[in-house]
Every structure is written in C-alpha cells, then in structure tokens.
Image (cartoon, helix red, strand yellow):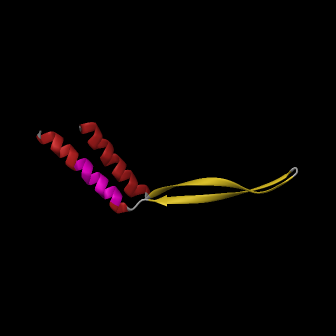
Amino acid sequence: MKPAAIILIVLGIAIVIWGGFGFATREKVFDLGPIHATREEHHNIPFGPLAGAVIVLGGVVLLLKGRTT
C-alpha cells in the first residue's frame, strides 16, 4: 500500500508543477513530385491544479490508512 501512496503523491505534485503536457503532429500540406511540404502543429493538454491536489490528497489518505491498519 505504501508504494502506491508514494507514487500517487509524486504524480500529484508533478501535475501541480508542470500543469500539463504537449505533443506535436506533422501534417502533409501538399505533395507535388519531388516537392513536399509539411506543417507541424503543437497540441497542449492541460491538467488543472485541482486534479493534482486531489491525487496528492488521495495518496496521503492511502498512506495514512495503511499506517493505521
């Protein structure tokens, strides 16, 4: 129970600090013989700080519950 609680706490703190993650995709604009054109588009997926706080709280509760049992 203790390792799961620690993982939740670390994950929740990381979500609060970074706030989300992003990735990039490439899309082919046109392809005319030997001439190729692509476009790179960046996407951001935000996490709310409230979600990170709830995860940290769940980890703390799990840690305390494992300690009393």
Q: How many marks?
A: 0
Along the line of sight, the residue nearer the viewer: 68 or 32: 32
Asked if residue 1 lies left or right of residue 51, the reply is: left
Along the line of sight, the residue nearer the viewer: 9 or 33: 33
Dividing the picture into quarters, in which one does residue 68 lie?
Answer: top left
Dividing the picture into quarters, in which one does residue 27 lie?
Answer: bottom right
Asked if the stretch drawn in magenta spans residue 56, the answer is yes
Q: Quadrant of the C terminus?
A: top left
Asked if residue 31 lies left or right of residue 55, the reply is: right
- Magenta residues, dominant SS class: helix
Along the line of sight, the residue nearer the viewer: 64 or 38: 38
Vertical comparison of 55 with 1: above or below: below
Asked if the stretch drawn in magenta spans residue 22, the answer is no
Q: Which residues are magenta?
A: 51-60
Q: Position of residue 41 (x, y in %)?
A: 64, 59
Dividing the picture into quarters, in which one does residue 32 lie?
Answer: bottom right
Q: Position of residue 36 (x, y in %)?
A: 81, 53
Q: Position of residue 21 (x, y in %)?
A: 49, 55
Instruction: Tell me the residue at 21%/44% (across/down).
Output: 63
